[in-house]
Amino acid sequence: MLELGSDHTEAISSIHVDKRGRTCGGPAAALQGLPLEGIISASYAPREDLFLEGDRVGCIFEIAKGIICGYRLSPDGTRHVVSFYFPGDLIACCWPDRSTFSAQALTPVRVRRIPKSAIDHMIEQRPGFARQLLDLTGHELAVTRDHLMCIASKSAEAKIAGFLLALQHRNRQQSKDPDTLDIPMTRVDIGDYLGLTIETVSRTLTKLRRSGVIDLPKATTILIKSGEALQSIAGE
């Protein structure tokens, strides 16, 4: 999950933007030692839903490949993207019986579906594992709070700048080029995540390009030319 924010010193695995620029999700390494019984690998095509809000899922998802967005639909049909998930992230570790959001593949995706019975077994056998899940849940709640504050209080330019900085931070933590960002999500996806229209997202990216802060060699790639300028725009 991506976090939109100011302190890019902490690294967790997924992409949800908060005020500290960390990434939020599940450290898949915590699942080492899980019993293999009942764990199923599954693949999904782009724009295929893994599950829908209200579904009885009965498992958590460990992302092995691809990008997933979590989203909710308002009563009028408006889509709100609540998070982006990347390889190594876990989805739904803190669910009740029914899912509270939907999840859709943005690219070809491969996941491991881990039954909650396996998680329960781990909790019983490894007391420290329960603490890891609790920490993960608390962090995700904090990220959600910060994301809501960002959407409510920041300008369009600040939102876009924070989004790009969070992607840059994730690249850096994975030893990738921090200034070359692969953007698998569409402008609509980004807008639905940041509370902006597609026109505002496109217009803001064009403005940043014209000012020399970024370059847009193609729709799926953004080059950061001035990280300092992005931080200033984002209010960091």
Image (tube, grey):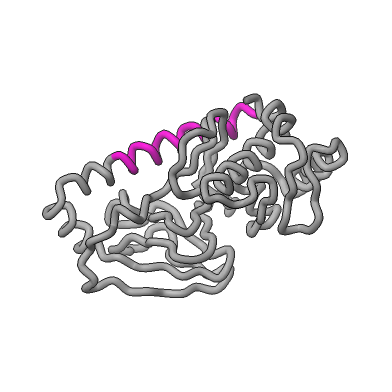
Q: Which quarter shows the C terminus?
A: top right
Left or right, residue 119 beside residue 166:
left
Q: Which residue lies furthest to the right in this view?
A: 210
Q: Nearer the viewer, residue 16 or 226?
A: 226
Q: Nearer the viewer, residue 55 or 47?
A: 47
Q: Quadrant of residue 31?
A: bottom left
- Asked if the stretch drawn in magenta spans residue 138, the answer is yes
Q: Residue at x 58, y 66 (%)?
A: 107
Is residue 148 in view? no
Q: Which of 58 and 130 is in front in this view?
A: 130
The percent coordinates of residue 199 (x first, y second) are 78, 47
Q: Residue furthest front?
A: 175
- Asked if the stretch drawn in magenta spans residue 73, the answer is no
Left or right, residue 115 beside residue 111:
left
The percent coordinates of residue 155 (x first, y second) are 69, 30
* 41 over 28 or under it: above or below: below
Please give the count of numbered marks on the rendered protein.
Answer: 0
Q: In which quarter of the image is residue 4?
A: top right
Q: Is the magenta stretch mostly helix, strand or loop?
A: helix
The percent coordinates of residue 174 (x first, y second) are 52, 50
Is residue 125 in view? yes
Q: Which residue is drawn at 38% across and 55% down?
A: 90
Q: Which residue is drawn at 76% across and 58% down?
A: 219
Magenta range? 135-154
Q: Residue at x 21, y 63 (%)?
A: 118
The percent coordinates of residue 133 (x first, y second) are 28, 46
* 158 over 60 or under it: above or below: above
